[in-house]
Image: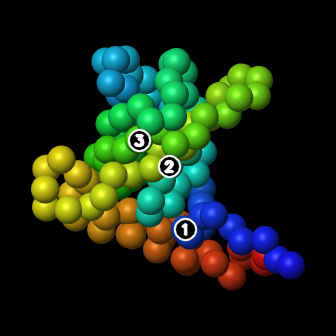
Amino acid sequence: MESLDRRYCERFEVPGAQVLYKLNQGVCARTQLKNITKSSVRFEIKHDAKPGDFVELEIQIPRKERICAKGNIVWISNSKPPYYSVVQFLAFSTDKRYNSLECLEQLKRVEAEYFLANEEYAPTR
């Protein structure tokens, strides 16, 4: 029987992209973006954090506008450093408590440029 992948969005890399993150505790850092989807982002985390922590993000794509997003940590690697975290974005809405609809549109444009345009080179499952 074939196993099901829990992810519903394919991860893709964006060369040179960085993330500025700010945790609830007020600590912040800039780091390299490892990969991204329309629903989450993975990056190296340099501070103590745990799943469930709220994070404000500023995703910086080279030669593009910055994407401001909010989310919650859903995973942190527990291997040797560097440690990586996955932040799942909050919902997209006109409600200011969530991510803006413009944020979603920006993520779709990044996906179109960096993933969908090169889909023919993506490995098959």
Q: Is residue 51 above or below residue 69?
A: above
Tell me how far mark 3 sits from mark 1, CA to CA: 17 Å
Kind of residue indicated by mark 2: Val
Q: Between disc 2 and disc 3, whose residue precedes?
A: 2
- Give residue 3's quadrant in the image: bottom right
Q: Where does label 3 land, which residue? A: 72
Quadrant in the picture for the C terminus: bottom right
Residue 35 falls left or right of residue 4: left
| Secondary structure beneath label 1 | loop
Disc 3 crowd, CA 10 A, few/some/many (<14, 14-19, 20+): some
Query: Residue furthest toward the bottom?
Result: 120
Residue 27 x, y percent position in the rendering? 37, 17
| Residue in the picture at 32% in, 36% down | 56
Tell me how far mark 2 sits from mark 3, CA to CA: 10 Å
Tell me whether circle 1 and circle 2 mark residues in contact (CB < 8 Å).
no
Quadrant in the picture for the N terminus: bottom right
Disc 2 crowd, CA 10 A, few/some/many (<14, 14-19, 20+): many
Kind of residue indicated by mark 1: Cys
Residue 89 x, y percent position in the rendering? 39, 51
| Residue in the picture at 69% in, 82% down | 120
Mark carried by residue 114: none
| Residue in the picture at 77% in, 23% down | 80
Kind of residue indicated by mark 3: Asn
Mark carried by residue 9: 1
Q: Is residue 108 above or below residue 49?
A: below
| Residue in the picture at 13% in, 50% down | 96
Query: Residue furthest toward the front?
Result: 1
Q: Is residue 25 visible?
A: yes
Q: Where does label 2 land, which residue? A: 41
Tell me whether circle 3 and circle 1 mark residues in contact (CB < 8 Å).
no
